Image (spheres, rainbow, N blue to C red):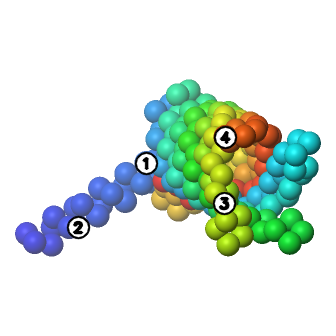
Amino acid sequence: MNRILPATLMFLVLSAGSAHAREYGKFGTVEIGGSFNAAQTTADYGDEGGTTTTLGGSVQPFAGLFVLPGVQVFANGEVGWAQAENGNERTTSQTVGVGIGGAVLVGIGRARLGPSLAIRHVEESVELQGGEKTTVRIGPGAELAGVAKLQVGGGGIITVAVFAAHELLEDEVDSFTRTTIGTRGGFSI
């Protein structure tokens, strides 16, 4: 009896994963996962500071629901980090954000491909070298992506995307725009 319960639970979990793989992209399918971004960001500080380009990355937890076959709505979070050098000055930044959006994913074999659009809210803390000054910037943004999702195994989904994001951030002194172009890789179930 002690071995029957774990074997039954294992069978139910594995069969549920296989059913999920066959149903991916259908109405009611839930997807939960995360991804890692590698990106180049260009911030335009206007007349005051010119333009700065940084390289960085972020981690994004993700939850999505297919509301129609091939049409997914989703919510995600973001925790990011970047470092930039501008002449003798080095800055580091930490970003926290949330977003909601949707994607239209066309099925091609076991893959789903299509565009994705998300509306975001971002908070960025920027610290000058040596911790001399920390600035907090907050604002809305949008992200457009080309997404490819491939089913693997009994229910896993590997995601690869190319994206462009644009934000309008403000701090206590001024406002500026920030454009990010990057790639994303992730895994979900």
Find disc 3 in the rendering and name its residue: 133
In this rendering, the label closer to the viewer, 2 or 3 = 3
Picture residue at 48% right of the left edge, 59% below the top: 154
For disc 4, the neighbor class at 10 Å (few under 14, some 14 to 19, many from 20) is few
Give residue 19's mark: 1
Separation (CA) of disc 2 from disc 3: 58 Å
Most extreme residue toward the left, as rendered?
1
Find disc 2 in the rendering and name its residue: 7
The amino acid at mark 2 is Ala
In the image shown, does 126 or 62 lie closer to the viewer?
126
Q: Earlier in the sequence, mark 1 or mark 3?
A: 1
Mark 4–mark 1 CB contact (< 8 Å): no
Element class at badge 3: loop
Q: Where residue 6 sits: x, y (%)?
A: 20, 67
Element class at badge 1: helix
The amino acid at mark 4 is Glu
Q: Is residue 84 left or right of residue 122?
A: right
Q: Is residue 176 left or right of residue 27?
A: right
Separation (CA) of disc 4 from disc 2: 60 Å
In this rendering, the label closer to the viewer, 1 or 3 = 3
In the image shown, does 176 or 41 lie closer to the viewer?
176
